[in-house]
Amino acid sequence: MTRSAHRDVFITGATGYLGSALARELVERGHCVRALVRAGSEKKLVPGCEPVRGDALDAASFQGAVAPADTFVQLVGIPKPAPWKGEQFRAVDRRSALAGIVAAKAGQVRHFVYVSVAQPAPVMRSYVLVRAECEAAIGVAGLVATILRPWYVIGPGHYWPLVLRPAYSILEAIPRTRESAVRLGFVTLAQMVTAMVASIENPPKRTRILATAEIRAARA
């Protein structure tokens, strides 16, 4: 990797399902990774990450430690989203994203990476609304961002939707339902990590959105 391709990445949610996989891949590729953690959770980070202690819901607790990162990755959220978790989405997903936006702006990062959700969608309305609000806040803050919009990420502990794969295959083959079936289709954990790494290593000049099809097609 050339020096020009080296990234200094600040991650919130680096001990989670997606965050730990992303952090591991970034470290293996030679990038500098610093991760926001609560005190006492440092051992949960993958080897090679530098811990930064703070509260993901309070920008003031960590915004001074964001610089000199050129990339900020926002991954804090309620695990295994469900329709009945609306209050948790607002209390954790929304608050942490807004705090991340404030901290990234204060740290003058050049690229903000945010995992949103596929939209429009017929279910999970509170989750979609919170993520859409956070997308809008990124724009208001004037941050250049990569916004990824998966519907469900298949991986360890998250395999149950595979029983629906035959139905999705049929819907994707029908012209009338193809677009929505692809938009609300599945991506694998490996595909998400690849798409995020590719985005981090090749930052955009203006905000871009990666839907399911683009996530599946990404190459790092």
Image (cartoon, helix red, strand yellow):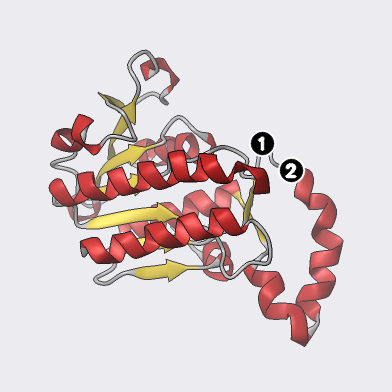
Residue at (24, 71) in percent of width and height: 205
Location of residue 25 in the rendering, given as x and y in whole percent from the top left corner: 43, 40
* Residue 216 position by quadrant: bottom right
* Residue 46 visible to the viewer: yes
Using the image as rendered, state which of residue 36 and residue 204 is in the foreground: 36
Location of residue 7 in the rendering, given as x and y in whole percent from the top left corner: 24, 47
Location of residue 33 in the rendering, given as x and y in whole percent from the top left corner: 29, 36
Using the image as rendered, state which of residue 48 and residue 170 is in the foreground: 170
Q: Mark 1: which amino acid?
A: Pro
Crowding around mark 1 (Cα neighbors within 10 Å: few <14, some 14 to 19, many 20+) is: few
Residue at (24, 54) in percent of width and height: 5
Location of residue 126 in the rendering, given as x and y in whole percent from the top left corner: 57, 55
Residue at (41, 36) in percent of width and height: 13
Find residue 159 and name its label. Answer: 2
Q: Are marks 1 and 2 in contact (CB under 8 Å)?
A: yes
Find residue 52 and name its label. Answer: none
Residue at (60, 59) in percent of width and height: 125
Residue furthest to the front:
87
Q: Tell me if 64 is positioned left or right of 151 in this view.
A: left
Residue furthest to the top:
40
Q: CA distance from mark 1 to mark 2?
A: 7 Å
* Residue 74 visible to the viewer: no
- Which residue matches tag 1? 156
Crowding around mark 2 (Cα neighbors within 10 Å: few <14, some 14 to 19, many 20+) is: few
Using the image as rendered, state which of residue 174 and residue 22 is in the foreground: 174
**Element at badge 2?**
loop
Q: Tell me if 103 is positioned left or right of 120 in this view.
A: left
**Element at badge 1?**
loop
Using the image as rendered, state which of residue 202 and residue 57 is in the foreground: 57
Q: Mark 2: which amino acid?
A: Tyr
